[in-house]
Image: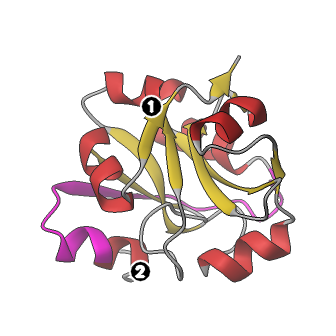
Amino acid sequence: MARGTPATVAARRAGVAHTLHEYAHDRATREYGAEAVRRLGVDPARVAKTLLALTGDGRHVVAVVPVPATLDLKALAAAVGAKQAALAPPADAQRLTGYVVGGISPLGQRRALPTVVDASLAGFATVFVSAGRRGLEIELAPCDLVRLTNATLAPIAKG
């Protein structure tokens, strides 16, 4: 079974019911979310990707959206009271979260950042997010995801 990650430690310490799902990550893939969906064999709308954005006023914000969707940067900016937002460079995402791209979890990040979870995820009993490394997903209730990340729920996904 998987070694612990800051994400799994955070869930365990909070006493949150969760299930870990480990799979062999294909190093050739760069479509990390699609790979997780394929390997888990679950509804793609239940599997989320974690993205880092930079607002026009210089704040970094975490966005959690379903894998098949794209992040609506205008909606994200509005959700955090900014005029605009853009995706942060991968190097910034890795440095600020403590995770590698493709394994960035919204849980247990190096630094607590404002987080927005797409409202569509709240419609499921459980959702899947990265557990802190490629090939490891954590399944938990959306309400626990929101609580552990102190997130705002907002419609930030399109497509």
Q: Which residue is mark 1?
A: 46
Q: Split into 4 quadrants, where in the image is the C terminus?
A: top right
Tell me the kind of residue under disc 2. Pro
Reply yes or no: does residue 15 show up in magenta. Answer: yes
Residue at 58% of width from left, 37% of height from top? 79
Residue at 64% of width from left, 57% of height from top? 61
> Which is more toward the observer, 60 or 122?
60
Q: Which residues are magenta?
A: 10-30
Relative horizontal placement of residue 37, taking residue 43 as reference (left or right): right
Indicate the position of residue 58 as horizontal and vertical percent values. Answer: 78, 64
Relative horizontal placement of residue 134, taking residue 89 as reference (left or right): left
Q: Which residue is mark 2?
A: 6
In 3D space, how far apart are the residues under numbered discs 2 and 1 (Cα atoms)? Answer: 22 Å
Q: Secondary structure at mark 1?
A: helix
Indicate the position of residue 123 as horizontal and vertical percent values. Answer: 33, 21
Q: In this rendering, is residue 60 above or below 9?
A: above
Q: Which mark is residue 102?
A: none
> Which is more toward the observer, 133 or 2?
133
Indicate the position of residue 157 as horizontal and vertical percent values. Answer: 64, 27
> Is residue 46 visible from the viewing direction of this image?
yes
